[in-house]
């Protein structure tokens, strides 16, 4: 297994439309360890399309409890189970994920009970374990060391994560407003994957969504990062490559790669990846 990150879903926000990309999910492959980072809608198909056998799922990390980052956590685990999963899966993330899992199991209790009784499958509930992330302490996932940092994403708790092994490092910004401290957290990383939005495209996106008011625009502006600011962070951090992900918007034909490139040109001239679903970035 070569070291890489696969961007499975690259859209910011939970809605999908005809022709749009999927909400956020990623697969990190480093030092022989696979880690799913976020489980937005489409993560299960995204993993299969990357050639991963779902029965081999064992580590998941969640940045925060907005639906575009964990809506498909339960369905992924259930689908992995019916695909042959019989070994433990650990889910790392903020408080609240275990409660979500309890309610998911309750919603599927008839199906799960039938499959255990009728098909001889192991108890799904017993295979999944949750660990609440403490940003003051690092943790390990196999050969990987992981650090977390709380981001600025009101009104929910969100974490950025830095994964390191064998001299390589990858940073996922999570969702956050412009946060100069991210530069120190990402310092020297081989790859910074940072959320990004295009300010000039937001009014058209508001009109397209149609059922939000000024509070939605206020949320974007106080809880997310403009692409130019993400580029500024990458430059200050001295990272080797920058990928923009969780794109707001990702599906407006009036704003394509040229506009994203122009938005970062003043601050970043290094290797750059504009995320799209299924993109593999080598490490």
Image (cartoon, rainbow, N blue to C red):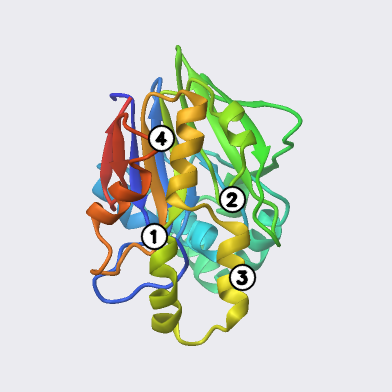
Location of mark 4 (residue): 28
Location of residue 277 in the rendering, given as x and y in whole percent from the top left corner: 29, 53
Of label 1 and label 3, which has the lower sequence position? 1
Residue at (42, 73) in percent of width and height: 15
Q: Quadrant of residue 231?
A: top left
Using the image, tell me which numbered label, if any, was put on residue 11. Answer: 1
In this view of the protein, which residue sits in the foreground, 141 or 153? 153
Location of residue 253 in the rendering, given as x and y in whole percent from the top left corner: 23, 69
In this view of the protein, which residue sits in the foreground, 244 or 156? 244
- The relative height of residue 141 versus residue 59 in the rendered view (above or below) is above
What is the distance, in whole Å, between disc 1 and disc 3 at their CAs? 19 Å
**Do we see residue 7 in this rendering?**
yes
Asked whether disc 1 touches disc 4, contact meaning CB atoms under 8 Å apart, the reply is no
From the image, state whether disc 1 or disc 2 is nearer to you.
2
What is the distance, in whole Å, between disc 3 and disc 4 at their CAs? 32 Å
What is the distance, in whole Å, between disc 2 and disc 3 at their CAs? 14 Å
From the image, state whether disc 1 or disc 3 is nearer to you.
3
Of label 3 and label 4, which has the lower sequence position? 4
Secondary structure under badge 4? Answer: strand
Of label 2 and label 3, which has the lower sequence position? 2
Location of mark 2 (residue): 176
Asked whether disc 1 touches disc 3, contact meaning CB atoms under 8 Å apart, the reply is no
Location of mark 3 (residue): 218
What is the distance, in whole Å, between disc 1 and disc 4 at their CAs? 18 Å
Of label 4 and label 2, which has the lower sequence position? 4
Q: Quadrant of the N terminus?
A: top left
Within 10 Å of the Cα at label 2, are there few (<14), some (14-19), or many (20+) other Cα atoms?
A: many
Secondary structure under badge 2? Answer: loop
Residue at (69, 59) in percent of width and height: 154
């Amino acid at each position: 297994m070569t070291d890489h990150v696969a961007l499975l879903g690259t859209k910011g926000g939970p809605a999908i439309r005809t022709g749009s990309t999927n909400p956020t999910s990623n697969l990190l492959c480093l030092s022989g360890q696979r880690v799913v980072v976020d489980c937005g809608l489409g993560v299960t198909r995204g993993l299969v399309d990357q050639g991963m056998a779902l029965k081999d799922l064992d580590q998941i990390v969640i940045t925060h409890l907005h639906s575009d980052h964990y809506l498909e956590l339960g369905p992924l685990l259930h689908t992995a189970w019916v695909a042959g999963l019989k070994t433990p899966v650990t889910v790392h993330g903020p408080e609240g994920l275990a409660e979500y899992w309890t309610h998911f199991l309750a919603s599927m209790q008839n199906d799960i009970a039938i499959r255990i009784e009728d098909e001889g499958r192991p108890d799904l509930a017993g295979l999944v374990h949750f660990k609440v992330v403490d940003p003051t302490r690092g943790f390990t996932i196999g050969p990987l060391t992981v650090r977390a940092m709380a981001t600025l994403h009101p009104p929910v708790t969100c974490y950025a994560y830095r994964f390191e092994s064998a001299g390589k490092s990858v940073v996922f910004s999570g969702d956050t407003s412009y946060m100069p401290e991210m530069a120190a957290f990402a310092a020297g990383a081989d790859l910074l994957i940072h959320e990004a939005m295009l300010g000039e495209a937001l009014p058209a996106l508001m009109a397209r969504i149609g059922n939000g008011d000024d509070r939605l625009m206020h949320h974007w502006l106080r809880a997310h990062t403009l692409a130019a600011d993400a580029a500024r962070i990458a430059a200050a951090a001295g990272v080797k490559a920058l990928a923009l992900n969780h794109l707001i918007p990702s599906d407006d034909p009036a704003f394509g790669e040229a506009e994203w490139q122009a938005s970062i040109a003043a601050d970043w001239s290094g290797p750059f990846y504009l995320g799209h679903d299924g993109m593999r970035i080598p490490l």
